[in-house]
Amino acid sequence: MLQILFLANLCYLYGALWKSDHRVHNFNILMVDYDQGVIGESIRLAATALKADTFPSISEKSSTSYETTKDVESAVCRGDFWGAVYIHEGATANLSSALAGQDSDTYDPTQAITVVWNQVRYPTVAISLFSNLQVLSATAKFIYLRTNGSAALQALNTSSTSAAQVLFNPFDATSLDIASTPQSARFLLNTASIVMYTLMQFFFILAFNGITTGFNFYATIPIRTLIVFRLLASLAYALIGALLSCAYIWAFQESWGLNGVQFVQTWAILWLVMHINFLVLDAVIATIQITFVPFFTFTWIIVNITSTVMPFDVSAGFYKIGYVWPAHSLWGVMVQIWSGGCYNRLGRALPILFAWEVSMLGVDVWRQAVKGRAATVVAEEIERQEEGQTVSRESLSNTEMDVKGKSA
């Protein structure tokens, strides 16, 4: 049974990544051409040439839909697109002037194209997408030289050395990362850290239950008092656990540059999710046999981490069940916090989290009340048995005294 449990859970986890590279086309990249020249046409031809299941889909929109470059950046910030590429207005004219020897010394090829992305959304995936955007830019440059090289050579000012350099490097892309994650530990934010938020509560419950059972609190303390005490203790422990989790994230942020407000916001959402984990595990431990508790805990960890390890865009459709797990909502809220308000999914995440909190609080209180009543019944039964044995011993002693009295 144990091997089947591990097999099922790991198949579920590995299945989320199965053939994910063939679903990269589900990542939509916005393209806006403010120049309407040969550079934009080269980008279009490059997107057509690179079109494949293993390459992001380039979705071109008109400049009337996104009137300014800020509109493009806002679209990526909101999460409407995984990234964007836009061609600056006048890029082709600037290139032509540089080839003709006009301002070729000051010509900057990186001012022709800008790629926009948000690394904090999914650090590993975002880096891969950025690499794809660089490939798009390099392919567009190659296509430009192949299709427009002859015309560019004819327009080239051969007496200008800087103009010749422009011919070999006509344009390039500038990166605009909305929220970078430069720290080396960024790969742990949506993987190992998610596991820790559950394990901290699991070990606390084991220790807490050991204390309450060892001192027979369920039979000696009124159940309402005990439930309130457990609730306050769980809130305090989750608060401290969330604080320490924020502490190690901030301690190893390197040059990330998060501020104090983001620290408090991260602390608050971690507090909520850690308490949800406590309520879930506490209710389950009070319901099922202790033998099966590790099985449930392991499964709970796997389904939660699977919902954060990769975006649903590159997983099979049924993995979207991960929207209901607390860890996925937690990750969405933390992305918003760490990116300065981008990728706002509070309208979905907070109702899910508070639904878990309220429902599991009710279930946990009910199970603890049932457990308390059962402990009280057992204690009363033991007390009656002890009283019966005491009465029997007293009766036996009186009988023996009567016998001895008659003998005397």
Image (cartoon, rainbow, N blue to C red):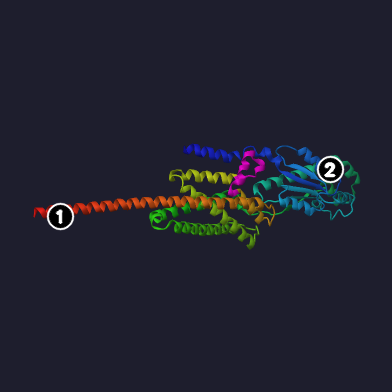
Name the mark nearer the viewer: 2 or 1.
Answer: 1
Count of residue discs: 2
- Report the residue marked by disc 2: 41
| Depth order, front residue of 171/136 | 136
Left or right for 261, reference 365: right
- Report the residue marked by disc 1: 401
Residue 305 x, y percent position in the rendering: 58, 46
Residue 335 x, y percent position in the rendering: 65, 53
Left or right for 93, reference 208: right
Residue plotted at (51% across, 60% down): 236
Left or right for 229, reference 387: right
Cα gap from disc 2 to disc 1, whole angstroms: 115 Å
* Residue 93 sits inside the magenta stretch: no
Q: Secondary structure at mark 2?
A: helix
Q: Is residue 309 visible?
A: no
Left or right for 6, reference 141: left
- Pick the quarter of the image with the C terminus: bottom left
The three-letter code of the residue at mark 2 reads Glu
Residue 232 x, y percent position in the rendering: 50, 59
Rate crowding at label 1 as few (under 14), some (14 to 19) or many (20 or more) other CA atoms within 10 Å: few
| Depth order, front residue of 348/193 | 348
The three-letter code of the residue at mark 1 reads Met
Magenta range? 307-327
- Mark 2 or mark 1, earlier in chain: 2
Residue plotted at (50% across, 44% down): 296
Residue plotted at (66% across, 41% down): 314
